[in-house]
Amino acid sequence: MTDPDVIELFERSCSLLGVEVHDRRQPPDKDRARTGFGRLAARAPEECDAWRGLAAAGDDSDHVLENAYQHLGTCGDLIAESAVDPAGLDFVFDTGLYLVLPATGAVGVKLAYAAKLATAGEFEKARDIVEDGAVKSAEPLWSAWILAVIYFRSGRWDNLRRVIAPLISSQDPYVRQAAQTANGVATAHLGQWQPAYDLLGGIDGPIATATAAALLTRALVARSLGKPEEASGLLNEAYAVVGAVGDDVKDQISAAMADPNYGIHPTTAARIDARSSYWDPATEPGEAEHAWELGADRRAQLKSEADAALAEFVGMDEIKDQLDRLDSSVKAATRRKEQNLPVRHKTLHLVLKGPPGVGKTSIARVISKRLCAAGVLKSEKFVEVGRGDLVDKVIGGSEHKVLTILKDIIQAGGGVLFIDEAYALTDSGSENDFGKLVLTEIMRYMVEYADILVVIVAGYADKMDEFLDSNEGLRLRFAREILLPSYTPDQLTEICERMAGKFSSTFEDLPAVQGRFDVLADARFRDSSGIVRTGIDAGANARFAERLVEFAEEERDHRLGDLDEPISREQEQLITAGDVDLAYGRLWKRLLNGFEYIKPGNDAVGHPVPQQLGGVR
């Protein structure tokens, strides 16, 4: 049972509102009614009818409507316990776009509150309210309009047109004019100039703001169609509209009249759907950017391709773990951004250290695909370069070369620049070498376009350290360093077995194959710069294994070609130990042509060998 004093205050406030109470009605005094309902709301804030009374008395502030909505559980309770007309607390509210609507009962409160939320930019909450089944069932027309307002204010023009379609032919002149105007404005913002021009030309109705908005938008469309004189005439008509025109529309008309370049910046439904934040137009990609945007299907395909490529690698569990960590960091940053949490800015430029033949280029491509799949890179552009692609002997030629490559990546929407043997840019020994100029330009782009450009440099670990120390601040530009170790003899044997299996070849004696790689691992070779390398590194790791299989198959085919008897399927497939020995001998000769052989088992790998000693200390 409600406090009788509360009921008495409620009835007295309703009388001041002009509502019929005890079958009597007095002239309204809304100022005094607001005072009465204000006292009632302070005394019984849990009573929705107190807040509805304030709204009916003209106070439809955010505070009032929020409290009415929060206490909907008591909506109608005070009316039920008093002698007040059940419709006495119904009020009207501004939807924020052309129409003023009635708020009847609890559903009316919900719609009014949703309109307030939309005005405040809280679109998600507003949409949840108007798309509630009970609201749509009770007020299908008004809930559709409020949803249209939500889409109008958030610039989701295609959604607006779908929602508003049933209202365009309404028999109510107010609703029809508002819906037709909103539809024409939405069509214009989607860049459909001629349809928008036609739609906005035949609108008539009693709403002054809608009339002015239609004329204004048609004028801006006329400008886009190359009709400046007609646009000027339409703006004059819009300016002269009689009645209460909204201030925002007035301001736009004045701005358009003062600036002949004032116009609509069109978008597309696809770009709207590509927003990183559903409701925020500022997160919508530009026209060029959207052209680069990868679709969900392509991103999924790139992820699948990257995973498949990674699965092909023998061993390298630590590398796979590092790539998974990179993937996790990228995904975490994306989640935090979506949840409006601070994100620590990290550049994704990285260093791949390792000898030839361990898959640096393949790993770089895997990283590129993973970054695209995660949405970090909008373009799958991947450019692989070396010193010859970047450095020119002619003054100005190097800058032209590197800028052409960098600008091409940026114009494609970003991507990955992969520089193999990056130290070749700085280790010429000449102070006047143009490689340093190239590096300066690359570093500038690494900073200026860090959001869309990833630079990956690769090479021997020792030489990459020299490269990173060759320029102050260069090492700091790279967030990660991934070390790709040399393959072990058993891993190279597995690589040989896999490669042979792809063409239905089999080894007669796999342990013998591994024995050859054991010898290679113990061997030491000195390169032209005096650095000692293991035989596996000098032979370029997996590339040596690949050549061993190819040469062994050649030896087998040559051996079988000398036979007179029929050759079986098994013979066509089998690589004998002799085939392997001959193939290995050919590859060993190649090594001797390119390196100086020292001796097996030396611990000075990776260090210069004094030339005068002819060996290792």
Image (cartoon, helix red, strand yellow):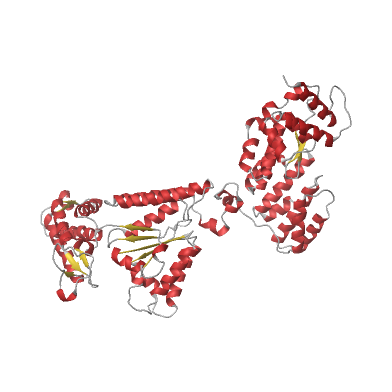
484 to the left or right of 585: right
Depth order, front residue of 74/272: 74
Q: Residue furthest top?
A: 1
Q: Quadrant of residue 173?
A: top right
Residue 95: x, y in percent?
Answer: 73, 41
Quarter of image, res 530? bottom left
**Quick one: 178 or 344, which is closer to the camera?**
344
Q: Residue at x 36, y 66 (%)?
A: 468
Q: In x, y percent, where is residue 387?
A: 36, 71
Identify which residue is drawn at 41% across, 54% down. 369
- Up-down relation of residue 172 to residue 272 (above or below): above
Residue 453 drawn above or below residue 181: below
Query: How many numbered marks, from 0 up?
Result: 0
The answer to whether residue 491 of the structure is visible from this angle is yes
Does residue 559 show up? no
Q: What percent of the width, then of the height, locates residue 406?
A: 46, 67
Q: Is residue 501 left or right of residue 156?
A: left
Left or right: residue 521 versus residue 34 is left
- Classify 141 as above or below 340: above
Quadrant where the C terminus is found in the figure: bottom left
Q: Nearer the viewer, residue 270 or 565?
A: 270
Where, quadrant-wise, is the N terminus in this rendering?
top right
Residue 219 in the image: x percent, y percent?
A: 75, 57
Of 178 and 606, which appears nearest the observer? 606
Q: Is residue 404 above or below residue 554?
A: below
